[in-house]
Image (cartoon, grey):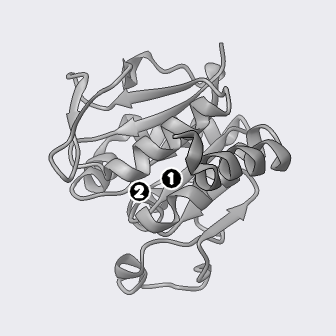
Amino acid sequence: MKYVAILLAEGFEEVEALLPCDFLRRAEIVTKLVSISEDLLVKGAHDITVQADMHLSEVQVADLLGVIVPGGMPGTKHLAENLAVIRLLNDAHAQGKIVGAICASPAIVMPKTNFFAEKTFTCTPSQRDLLADKKYYIEAPVVIDGKVITSRGPGTTAHFTHAIIQELKSKEIADALFTRALFHLEEC
């Protein structure tokens, strides 16, 4: 069964991991929370502990639809320092899978890969200001360059997730899901 892997490192941004997980599952896209450490319990940047579904060592690229890399500190730094994470991102991209990165991850994790150097992207403004080369940076909530989808941060996570669902399913399914979830509050 093909799935989307959302990578969790200690200090991940909870909104950027859990909103995509929730909405991808609502769209009937199998989604797995993946711990990059030995422990399945991973504490986020705001002290919310989440139980991952599996370990990074269990992920097989052939089984993936895509990989999502949330931001958050120090989670983003932990992801960037993990060679297995970078290898997974490189292999996923090489096999035509979606690679999504949000917040600080486009500026900190993605440059470690061998495919990101000339991709247009967006990221959190605090990291944008630290970029030595802003040549490929675009000021937008979401930027899609081929199979690479980037976004700015917690406030754009719904846009980011919509783009991923649109890529994996269709614009109609993504629109319907978000319209139902965001505008039909009487159902709650």
Kind of element beneath mark 1: loop
> Relative to residue 124, is residue 98 drawn left or right?
right
| Residue at 56% from the left image edge and 42% from the top image edge | 90
Kind of element beneath mark 2: loop
State the residue in front, 96 or 149. Answer: 149
**Label 1 with label 2: CB-CB less than 8 Å:** yes
Q: Residue furthest left?
A: 47
The disc at residue 109 is 2
Q: Quadrant of residue 150?
A: bottom right
**Residue 115 visible within the image:** no
| Residue at 61% from the left image edge and 32% from the top image edge | 26
Label 1 environment density (alpha carbons within 10 Å; few <14, some 14–19, many ≥20):
some
> Relative to residue 79, is residue 159 drawn left or right?
right
| Residue at 21% from the left image edge and 52% from the top image edge | 45
The disc at residue 113 is 1
The disc at residue 144 is none
What's the distance in space between the residues labelled 1 and 2, CA to CA? 8 Å
Residue 157, how many percent across, how many down? Answer: 51, 58
Label 2 is placed on what type of residue? Val
